[in-house]
Image (cartoon, rainbow, N blue to C red):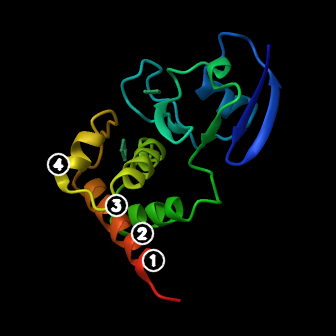
């Protein structure tokens, strides 16, 4: 079946099998391998992308369900806030092996679009669907708070 999916601002029209997962479509058809597949069973969150602005686990969505919708992935160069979140994860050591990181960052983007100044409890509850086996989460929470500062500082700066 043909699907027409906008990914990071680009339209892609592709022939896919009806059973194709969005995660597989993104990685194999579009070669955007920043989206990771850690479990394939909706547990780890490594595959998180934004679909029409909402965080979704792309191993749980069929490519067919994304037909006509807009997807944002970790590769999106056009989003200034996403760039700041990536920088903050590097500066605050929010990653070790990095496997969970694309999903953590896309969940963070969703979180920070909905709450510009999240506190620890808000961050923890929003990260409930994203697992990290390395960091113990403290550095991830610090990364998100730093990203929040960067995003807010930029927005109040007078030209
Ligand atoms: S690969 Fe999708 S939740 Fe783990
Ligand atoms: S940095 Fe290794 S799983 Fe999170």
- Which residue is tagged 4? 121
Q: What residue is shown at x 53% (from left), y 28% (from top)?
A: 58
Whole-angstrom CA distance, mark 3 to mark 4, is: 14 Å
- Which residue is tagged 3? 116
Whole-angstrom CA distance, mark 2 to mark 3, is: 8 Å
Quick check: which quadrant has ligand 2? top left
Mark with earlier residue (1, 3): 3
Between 108 and 35, the one lying in front of the other is: 108
**What is the x, y in percent for residue 13?**
82, 30
Q: Are marks 2 and 1 in contact (CB under 8 Å)?
A: yes
Q: What residue is shown at x 63% (from left), y 53% (from top)?
A: 76
Classify mark 2: residues with Cα within 10 Å, few (<14), some (14-19) or many (20+): many
Residue 144: in sight, yes or no? yes
Report whether the residue tagged 2 is closer than 8 Å to ligand 2. Answer: no
Mark with earlier residue (2, 3): 3
Classify mark 1: residues with Cα within 10 Å, few (<14), some (14-19) or many (20+): few
- Which residue is tagged 2? 151
Tag 3 secondary structure: loop
Mark with earlier residue (3, 4): 3
């Amino acid at each position: 079946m043909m699907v027409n999916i906008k990914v990071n601002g680009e339209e892609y029209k592709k022939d896919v099998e009806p059973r194709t997962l969005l995660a597989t479509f993104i990685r194999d058809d579009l070669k955007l391998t920043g989206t990771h597949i850690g479990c394939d069973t909706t547990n780890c969150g490594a595959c998180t992308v934004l679909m029409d602005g909402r965080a979704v686990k792309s191993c749980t969505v069929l490519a067919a369900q994304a037909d006509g919708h807009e997807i944002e992935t970790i590769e999106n160069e056009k989003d200034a806030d996403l760039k700041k979140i990536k920088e903050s994860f590097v500066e605050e050591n929010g990653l070790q092996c990095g496997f969970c990181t694309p999903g953590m960052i896309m969940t963070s983007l969703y979180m920070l679009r909905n709450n510009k100044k999240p506190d620890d409890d808000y961050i923890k509850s929003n990260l409930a669907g994203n697992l990290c086996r390395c960091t113990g989460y403290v550095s991830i929470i610090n990364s998100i708070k730093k990203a929040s500062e960067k995003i807010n500082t930029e927005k109040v700066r007078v030209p």
